Amino acid sequence: MDNLTEQELRAVFDVLNVYDPNDIKQVYPEMGDDKFMQDVYSAWGKILKLLRQDKPSDPTISWNYLGGVD
């Protein structure tokens, strides 16, 4: 996991930040269940913490999507 670049972490953050289980659950029902969403939120928070640690004023593409972060 340590092999991810900062740019790759930003890409994963953007994907997690705009993830909507309603968009995928008809195809992959498991990706809309509560347990999966808990994992998504957990990963999102951990990546957010890493990104804020490194460059708190350098946002990603989706930084303010739906008020996701300030």
Image: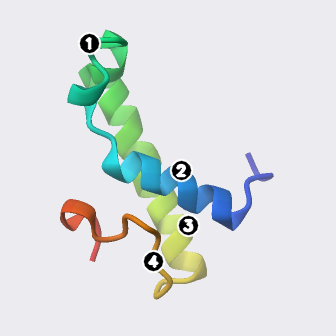
Query: Residues under labels 3 and 1: Cα distance?
Result: 32 Å
Contact, mark 2 vs mark 3 (Cβ under 8 Å): no
Q: Residue 32 in the image: state x and y as whole percent.
A: 27, 22
* Above or below, comparing residue 38 to residue 29 in the picture: below
Label number found at residue 12: 2
- Return the residue at label 4: 59
Residue found 73% across the figure and 54% down from its top = 4
- Return the residue at label 1: 26
Going from N to C along the chain, the mark reached first, 3 or 4, is: 3
Specify the color scheme.
rainbow
Going from N to C along the chain, the mark reached first, 4 or 1, is: 1
Residue found 27% across the figure and 77% down from its top = 70
Q: Is residue 35 left or right of residue 60?
A: left
Q: Residue 6 in the image: state x and y as whole percent.
A: 67, 66
Residue found 28% across the figure and 70% down from its top = 64
Query: Residues under labels 2 and 3: Cα distance?
Result: 12 Å
Mark 4: which secondary structure?
A: loop
- Return the residue at label 3: 50
